[in-house]
Image: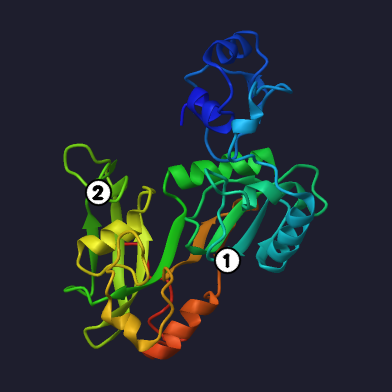
């Protein structure tokens, strides 16, 4: 988003006049360089601000810093969930229910504990992408600025291949295919929701494949987003008639499959990432299922060792 908008969200007490003065005098820096209000900020970039930037910090409802004791405890938990680490990056298996970044009413989040995740590195790890709070699975952290820039570009250029597993209510009419439906965030009766909209939506494409199914009641899908829109997988699966199990926004409120005793939580998991690592080597990192999805797999008779469960090749 624009730098001025990001700053106003982070520091609600910051007045427009003061913001413009700080930018004009070079007191706000973006990756070490002078910044303009219209500059775009992305994951992995570093914004430097002067002390006391917020004239009314008491109205800031989502500070980035969290209690040090809580931060240390959470960072220890995250360290135990690391599935790959090298000099350039950390890949961890994010638990469901944990936010990646702060927001209104969100005080505990991964971004708030990254100062405790250096593990011998000189720099604070940087986020290069994000997952929804209720989505579990692979989350990458860059350990250097150069790595952050490279990984961010890899996500933006779609060189990084993302594979998600989802349990859906119902079975798609086709075993595999492409969902090509533009998405826009629009107001509705239940608040702002992402919707398919041909006129206002941004391009969004998702590859899907049925790995297994239980009759006509539920499916185990492999999903590969080719674009990175907010709630893309949740809206796209809904669009083909198979909403993700346990989705409070885009799912079915009275899903019959829930009567089988499975957990009423979002069943969406970032199972694998394939990307170019340091030294120009191809890397694939994978994450085990969260506990609630493990229980559902057993209830529905799905086997993670199924020969069809390996990441399929990207369609051309």
Q: Residues within 10 Å of mark 1 (few under 14, many from 20)?
A: many
Within the image, what quadrant is residue 11 found in? Answer: top right
Q: Residues within 10 Å of mark 2 (few under 14, many from 20)?
A: few
Whether residue 252 is visible: yes
Q: Please, is residue 284 above or below residue 131 in the view?
A: below
Whichever of labels 2 and 1 marks the residue nearer the N terminus, that label is 1
Residue name at image x 66 percent, y 56 percent: 90
Of residues 79 and 150, the one drawn nearer to the viewer in this rendering = 79
Given the current orientation, which residue lies at the most extreme right position? Answer: 120
Indicate left or right for 80 with 244 as reference: right
Q: Please, is residue 26 above or below residue 209 in the view?
A: above
Residue 215 place in picture, x, y as percent: 24, 88
Indicate left or right for 40 with 212 as reference: right
Disc 2 marks which residue?
189
Residue 201 place in picture, x, y as percent: 24, 41
Of residues 263 and 154, the one drawn nearer to the viewer in this rendering = 263
Scheme of colours in the image: rainbow
Marks 2, 1: nearer the viewer: 2
Instruction: Find the distance from the CA under tag 2 to the CA under tag 1.
Output: 30 Å
Q: SS at mark 1?
A: loop
Label number found at residue 126 = none
Q: SS at mark 2?
A: loop
Residue 241 place in picture, x, y as percent: 20, 67
Q: Please, is residue 10 above or below residue 172 in the view?
A: above
Name the quarter where the C terminus is drawn: bottom left
Disc 1 marks which residue?
95
Residues at marks 2 and 1 touching, judged by CB atoms closer than 8 Å: no
Residue name at image x 59 percent, y 32 percent: 59
Whether residue 316 is visible: no
The tally of labels here is 2
Residue name at image x 75 percent, y 63 percent: 76
Given the current orientation, which residue lies at the most extreme front position? Answer: 58
């Amino acid at each position: 988003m624009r730098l001025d908008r990001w700053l106003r969200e982070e520091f609600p007490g910051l007045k427009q006049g003061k913001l413009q003065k700080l930018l004009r005098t070079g007191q706000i820096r973006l990756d070490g360089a002078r910044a303009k209000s219209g500059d775009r900020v992305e994951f992995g970039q570093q914004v430097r601000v002067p002390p006391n930037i917020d004239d009314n910090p008491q109205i800031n409802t989502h500070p980035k810093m969290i209690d040090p004791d809580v931060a240390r405890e959470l960072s220890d938990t995250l360290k135990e969930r690391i599935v790959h680490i090298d000099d350039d990056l950390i890949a961890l298996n994010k638990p469901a229910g944990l936010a990646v970044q702060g927001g209104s009413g969100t005080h505990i989040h991964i971004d708030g504990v990254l100062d405790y995740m250096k593990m011998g590195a000189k720099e604070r790890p940087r986020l290069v992408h994000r997952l929804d709070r209720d989505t579990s699975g692979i989350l990458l952290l860059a350990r250097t600025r150069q790595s952050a820039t490279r990984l961010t570009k890899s996500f933006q250029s779609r060189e990084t291949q993302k594979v998600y597993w989802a349990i859906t209510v119902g079975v798609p009419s086709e075993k595999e295919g492409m969902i090509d439906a533009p998405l826009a965030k629009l107001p509705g009766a239940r608040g702002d929701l992402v919707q398919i909209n041909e006129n206002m939506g941004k391009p969004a494409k998702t590859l899907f494949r049925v790995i297994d199914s239980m009759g006509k009641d539920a499916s185990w899908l492999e999903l590969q987003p080719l674009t990175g829109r907010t709630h893309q997988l949740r809206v796209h699966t809904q669009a083909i008639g198979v909403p993700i199990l346990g989705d409070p926004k885009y799912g079915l409120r009275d899903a019959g499959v829930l009567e089988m005793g499975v957990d009423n939580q979002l069943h969406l998991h970032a199972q694998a990432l394939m990307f170019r690592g340091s030294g120009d080597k191809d890397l694939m990192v994978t994450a085990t299922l969260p506990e609630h999805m493990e229980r559902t797999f057993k209830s529905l008779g799905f086997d993670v060792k199924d020969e069809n469960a390996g990441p399929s090749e990207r369609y051309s």
